[in-house]
C-alpha cells in the first residue's frame, strides 16, 4: 500500500534540502579553512523515519544540540564514522598517531569532535531557522555517549550528509537526527504558507 504524500510534505522536503545545503556550505567553508583543503558537504537525503530502528549506526560518541522553539525543537544529533573522524583529528591536531589510552589525547579528541559538530550543527540549524523565518534558541552542543535512548519519540527526521576532504583523502557520512515532532510542525507550517 502506497502512502499518500501531501504537496506540503514535498514542498517541505525540498525546502529542508535547500536550507540544509546552505548551512552545510557555510560549515564546509569554515572546516576547509581549518584543514587548508576543499571540503564538500551535501545533504544526500532528508527523510522521516517510521521507526527508530531506521536510525543509521552511530559511533559510540555523538554530539547533541538542543533546540527550543515553537516549530523547530528537540535534539539534533551529529555523528561521524570513527575512522574518518580520527583521520580528521590527526590532521587538525598534527598527530601521527593518537594513543587511545592517554587521557590528554582523549580530551583533545573529544574537544575537536565537539568543535566540528558545533560548526556543522550550528550552521545547519541557523540556516534552517533563517530559511523558514522561525524563532528557535540553539543551545551549546555537548558530547554524549550513544545509549540508544536520546529521543523520546520513535519517529525521527533524518538528514543524511556526505562529506569529502580532498587533502586528507577522507570521505564518509554524517547524520543529523531531529525529533519527528519538529517535522510534523514544519509540515503544518508549510501547509499554512
Image (cartoon, rainbow, N blue to C red):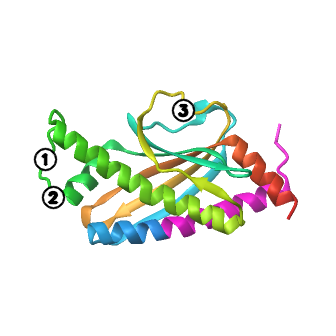
Q: Quadrant of residue 170?
A: bottom left
* Most frequent secondary structure within the magenta stretch: helix
Q: Is residue 123 above or below residue 69?
A: below
Q: Is residue 8 magenta?
A: yes
Q: Relative to 72, is 42 on the left or the right? A: left
Who is closer to the viewer here, 119 or 90?
119
> Could you say whether the residue bearing mark 1 is in a helix, strand or loop?
loop
Of the two numbered discs 2 and 1 in the rendering, the one whose residue sits closer to the viewer: 2
Rendered residue at 23%/47% (across/down): 108
Of pointers 1 and 3, the one earlier in the residue sequence: 1
Tell me which residue sits at (61%, 54%) in the image.
137
The residue nearer to you, when weighing 69 against 91, is 69
Residue 183, x across and y down, in percent: 72, 48
What numbered label is drawn on residue 56?
A: none
For the residues bearing labels 2 and 1, Cβ distance under 8 angstroms:
no
Residue 150's disc number: 3
> Which residue is labeled 2 in the image?
94
Judge the density around disc 1: few (<14), some (14-19), many (≥20) Cα neighbours within 10 Å: few
Check disc 2 and report its element: helix, strand or loop. Answer: loop
Q: Is residue 85 left or right of residue 55?
A: left
The answer for how far apart the CA atoms under marks 3 and 2 are is 33 Å
Residue located beneath label 1 in the image = 97
CA separation in Å, label 2 and label 1: 9 Å
Circle 3 — which element? loop
Residues shaded magenta: 1-25
- The relative height of residue 88 versus residue 156 in the rendered view (above or below) is below
Q: Residues within 10 Å of mark 3 (few under 14, many from 20)?
A: some
Amino acid at each position: 500500500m502506497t502512502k499518500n504524500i501531501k504537496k506540503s510534505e514535498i514542498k517541505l522536503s525540498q525546502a529542508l534540502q535547500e536550507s540544509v545545503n546552505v548551512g552545510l556550505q557555510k560549515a564546509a567553508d569554515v572546516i576547509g579553512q581549518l584543514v587548508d583543503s576543499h571540503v564538500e558537504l551535501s545533504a544526500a537525503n532528508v527523510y522521516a523515519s517510521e521507526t527508530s530502528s531506521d536510525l543509521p549506526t552511530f559511533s559510540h560518541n555523538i554530539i547533541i544540540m538542543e533546540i527550543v522553539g515553537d516549530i523547530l525543537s528537540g535534539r539534533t544529533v551529529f555523528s561521524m564514522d570513527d575512522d574518518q573522524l580520527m583521520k580528521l583529528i590527526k590532521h587538525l591536531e598534527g598527530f601521527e598517531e593518537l594513543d587511545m589510552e592517554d587521557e590528554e589525547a582523549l580530551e583533545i579528541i573529544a574537544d575537536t569532535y565537539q568543535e566540528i559538530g558545533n560548526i556543522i550543527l550550528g550552521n545547519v540549524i541557523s540556516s534552517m531557522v533563517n530559511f523558514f523565518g522561525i524563532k528557535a534558541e540553539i543551545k551549546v552542543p555537548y558530547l554524549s555517549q550513544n545509549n540508544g535512548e536520546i529521543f523520546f519519540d520513535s519517529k525521527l527526521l533524518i538528514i543524511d550528509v556526505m562529506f569529502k576532504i580532498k587533502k586528507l583523502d577522507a570521505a564518509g557520512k554524517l547524520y543529523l537526527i531531529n525529533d519527528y515532532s519538529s517535522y510534523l510542525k514544519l509540515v503544518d507550517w508549510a501547509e499554512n504558507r
